[in-house]
Amino acid sequence: MTERVVQLPGRGGADLLPGSLAGVSGRNALAFAHDMLWVLASAFFAFWLTANLGTFEHVLTPALGTFLLVMLPLQGAAFLLLRLDRGIWRFVSLSDLLCILKAVALGSVAGVLVLYFLGALPSVPRSAIVLYPALLGGGLAASRIVLRWSVEGRHRPEQSKRALVLGAGSAADLLIRDLLKQEDYRPVGILDDAREKQGSTLHGVPVLGHLGQLASRLRGPGIDVVLIAMPSAPGRVIRGLYDTCARAKVPCITLPRLSELASGRVGIARLRAVQLEDLLGREVVEIDAAAVRRFIAGKTILVTGAGGSIGSELVRQIAAQDPRHLILLDSGEYNLYAIEREVAERFPGLAFSASLTDIRDRARLRTVFERYRPEIVVHAAAYKHVPLVESNPVAGVEANVFGTRNVADLAVEFEAATFVEVSTDKAVNPRNVMGASKRLAEIYCQALDGRSQTAFITTRFGNVLGSAGSVVPLFRRQIESGGPVTVTHPDITRYFMTIPEAVSLILQAAAMGEGGEIFVLDMGEPVRIADLARQMIQLSGLLPGEDIGIAYTGLRPGEKLTEELFHPQEALAPTAHPKIMRARARDAAWDSLQQQLERLHALCQAGDASELRAALCEIMPEACLLEAQEEAPPGSLELAPPPPRLSLVRQKDKPAGATQQPSSRHIGSGRSFKQIILRARREEAVPPP
């Protein structure tokens, strides 16, 4: 005969049928027997205390026998009903103790009712009826707590690492609970800046002082590893703590950031090595998900540059919002293939198409618009690598200016509702062809906004971590090959944000835009690239200057020491989202702009790079483009930055021979987003020319 196993939903997997002893076996049988022994002991001691601790003859009475005959089966049924035998005692928690109280109360009340209906209640001492559940509940809870205490408090093996925990908040609370159950780490102390927590303990682990005492705590031999349990701490705090640990040569690991912890519990399994994103400390971005979904859901959307770093993340986030049809457009075969496969695997129910199209090919682009007629166009296709575009200015202008013009003109012709231009902070007071070409693309889109039914929205932000052209993968490769890590200038700074963060803010800005706006994303604090290089070397377990050197190669053609977020004539205004600001667009005369673009197009056709740079500066007076130079050959690394280069085009009121440094009037040069906003609000907005 085949045995049939019946499973009911409940805690711990296959559950016992209520009131049945059939499932009690093995470890569960021992737990059940233990609990039943406590029923016997609690009844005996309740009657003994009622008898004033007299002789056993006064305790072993017929009343006790009747009491046990009623209580044993009823209490056993209550234990099985609430599955007390299924709990793992070494992990007993408050919920388990509440189950014990419920089982004791249920069995006791049921027993008293049965004794009453049998007419045996008058023979049972009233004090015994009160003492019995108190003794039983206390005994069942105490035995489990003692077992957990003995397991967690036993001597840990010598290989357990003595851990200093940083932070005494809720994350540290959960982490230390988990650490006490494991043998890998032994928490010996906590550091936290909260004054009220000083001198207290958390699960028996003392709070030894504040975070500023970390260096002194690490000087002795008593700490093997530092565990950071502050998932919401800003990047500057994590950087300081990590640098202190690196100087003391003590390993430092951390809990993930809040955005990573959102989908899982805190525990030892979530500890990981400190990553670059932790040191940069980007805050969790909260967006109006409902507004973004209303903007995207049920619409046909075209994403240009869909295979790039930003474009592919745009595709992922848009695909998750249920568009009617998603068109992926890119000129790179492999990149387009990769994102096409990813979409097919991750979003099997999504209607999408992949178009291998160059945005400079207007005829081919027209067929895409004719076939799909997108309602929203997100234009992320561009040449963005500054040195490459600087040495290939014609290709850069053709893609960034005239490729954008092709996409924008067709969006207007085929009546797209919204056009989102993905721009860059290098478009502000540009010093290179890439920035100037992106600024001209901004100007063209803003000019089109007032001449069409299509809403043109521009989003502007800085560098993103992990993109194909970012310094981060370059530094990583250089570290893996033994160095040196090459930095162009000791004082060069850049704004950084993660790719998912940038894309989510792009979509948020697009959802709130009405047309004609330039939205600037909060880039946080500027980061010194030299510091970034040192931190990446340390994250690899090496010492900067000893294991891996840092070589300064000099500023590359078109490269600025600091990037800027706003031009002085772009009056700032807050938006409904704290991470997004709106800049007032500067109007351009349409006829004049068209003439200038035609001249620029002719220069591209002629391949005249010098005249092309001059023409860009004439169109945009704020642009100051430097003459392209050959980059230093491999091995000719300089240890100091070269002399500053002179401007190719003389600017108005600029003394001859003056070096090209960012003007103090340029808003956003090396400042945090908050500082930019405060300064902009203090100054009077300069009226546009």
Image (cartoon, rainbow, N blue to C red):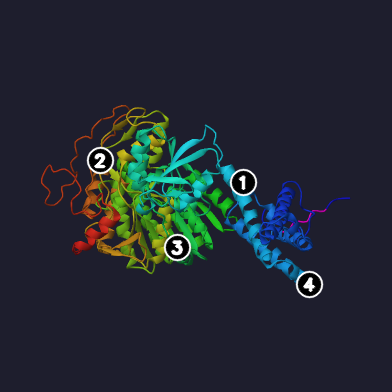
Residue under pointer 3? 376
* Earlier sequence position, callout 4 versus callout 2: 4
Question: Where is mark 1, residue-wise?
Answer: 147
User: Does the magenta-highlighted stretch encompass residue 498?
Assistant: no
Q: Is residue 617 left or right of residue 120?
A: left
Q: Nearer the viewer, mark 2 or mark 3?
A: 2
Residue beneath the point at 23% across and 35% down:
641
Q: Residue at x 68, y 65 (%)?
A: 129
* Quarter the C terminus occupies: bottom left
Q: As rendered, which of 685 and 255 lies closer to the eye?
A: 255
Left or right side of 562 for 105: right
Report the side of 553 relative to 541 (left or right).
left
Q: Determine the CA span between mark 3 and mark 1.
A: 63 Å
Mark nearest the camera among 4 and 2 is: 4
In the rendered image, the vertical position of residue 307 relative to residue 46, given as above or below: above
Number of numbered discs visible in the structure rendering? 4
Spatial CA distance of label 2 from label 3 is 41 Å
Q: Nearer the viewer, residue 498 or 28?
A: 28
Task: Specify the amino acid type for callout 3.
Answer: Ile
Give, as a three-letter code, the residue at label 1: Leu
Residue 119's label in the rendered image is: 4
Q: Residue at x 56, y 39 (%)?
A: 154
Q: Secondary structure at mark 4?
A: loop
Q: Which residues are magenta?
A: 4-8
Q: Residue at x 49, y 43 (%)?
A: 271
Residue 243 in sight here: no
